[in-house]
Image (cartoon, rainbow, N blue to C red):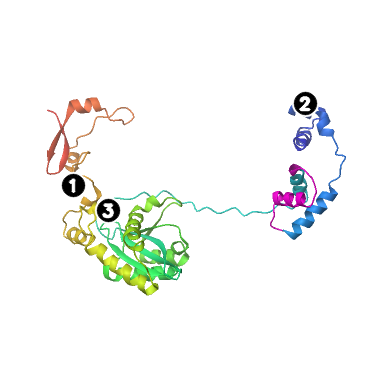
Amino acid sequence: MKAAVEHVEQQYAFSQRRACKLLMVAVSSVRYQARSSDEDLRTRLVELAREKPRFGYRRLHVLLRRSGDVVNHKRVHRVYREAGLALRRKKRKHCVRQSAPLRQYTAANQEWALDFVHDAIAAGRAIRVLSVVDAFTRECLALEVDTSFASRRVTRVLDEIIQHRGEPRSIRCDNGPELTSRHFLAWCIEKKIELVHIQPGKPTQNAHVESFHGRLREECLRISWFQNLFDARRKIAIWRHDYNEQRPHSSLNYRTPAEFARQASFGKDVGSAHFENADGVSNFPTASAAAGQERLPCGKWGQINWKRLSHDFSFDRNADGLNWVHRQ
């Protein structure tokens, strides 16, 4: 409060009494001068701070009490700040990303999803598994196993996939150091691949690879005992082949990812992996209805007038799905 009174006095040229009255502070409190000296406490705090340079005032207060000095913790904090002993703490830099919701895919290689999953071998050494999943066909394109991954190792794996599969339009990944390095960013620019980074702390924005990791951990990692790194590579490679060629996928109408990819390449069942209703029934006007220049009745601000809609329109189910038909 003394600092506030002094600020008002200097800023508005008020007297001390008037400033105290304005701030509703007693004049005696402002004019009070401490009779006790803090020099002994200051000297003791400086000595303890030199012995324990990373201790804050709370731990230094505990050390003072252990040595027999009875002093209030608020007084310790005040003297601690006045002596310039406060620790400078670095604020953590938070990565800021725009929201990256999942898209609707109609063909392979439109987007690949990348992420890492961790496990350990029998000796206790940690291993990492790089997963690359096609967001449309749900194929596992790579399961690279090693103890560590640099960004150049990641791009080397992606180059091997591109050699026999082609380049993707975009890559979705998190904000790990391997996927935000200058080398990886330059590689994506050189290949003309859009890089989609999800927001930190929101793995659901990369749901395809997260769901795949659930199956990988449940069906392979938790039930396998890896004797060494080479054994882990062999067993995970066998599981990847089984996942692509033998395992039925529920979101693909219980077809394997390889089978669905072959059918999609010939134009069969394209887009059926994105809808829960296998009949293809749409709840919105289709292209044929839009071609007829039929417009839904809307209010002043664009809201649909459902009462008028039910009176003027009816539903007609045909090969294109469920369409809006204007009543004659």
Whole-angstrom CA distance, mark 3 to mark 1, is 16 Å
Alpha carbon of mark 2 to alpha carbon of mark 1: how far?
A: 77 Å
Spatial CA span between label 3 and label 2 = 70 Å
Q: Nearer the viewer, residue 24 or 187?
A: 24
The answer to whether 64 is drawn above or below residue 50 in the figure is above
Number of marks in the image?
Answer: 3
The amino acid on which the numbered mark 2 sits, given as a three-letter code, is Lys
Q: Which residue is mark 2?
A: 21
Which one is earlier in the sequence, the residue at label 3 or at label 1? 3
Dot 2 or dot 1, earlier in sequence: 2
| Quarter of the picture holding the N terminus | top right
Horizontal and vertical percent for residue 127? 42, 67
**Dot 1 alpha-carbon crowd within 10 angstroms: few under 14, some 14 to 19, many 20 or more:** few
Q: Which mark is residue 278?
A: 1
Where 24 sits versus 57, above or below? above
Q: Is residue 187 above or below residue 78?
A: below
Magenta region, residue range: 53-74
- List the residue tagged with mark 3: 105
Which circle, 2 or 1, is nearer the viewer? 1
Q: Quadrant of residue 165?
A: bottom left
Magenta segment: does it hold 19? no
Seen as rendered, the residue at the extreme bottom is 230
> Seen from this angle, which residue lies furthest right?
35
Dividing the picture into quarters, in which one does residue 286 lie? top left
User: What amino acid does circle 1 point to?
Assistant: Ala
Q: Amino acid at mark 3?
A: Tyr
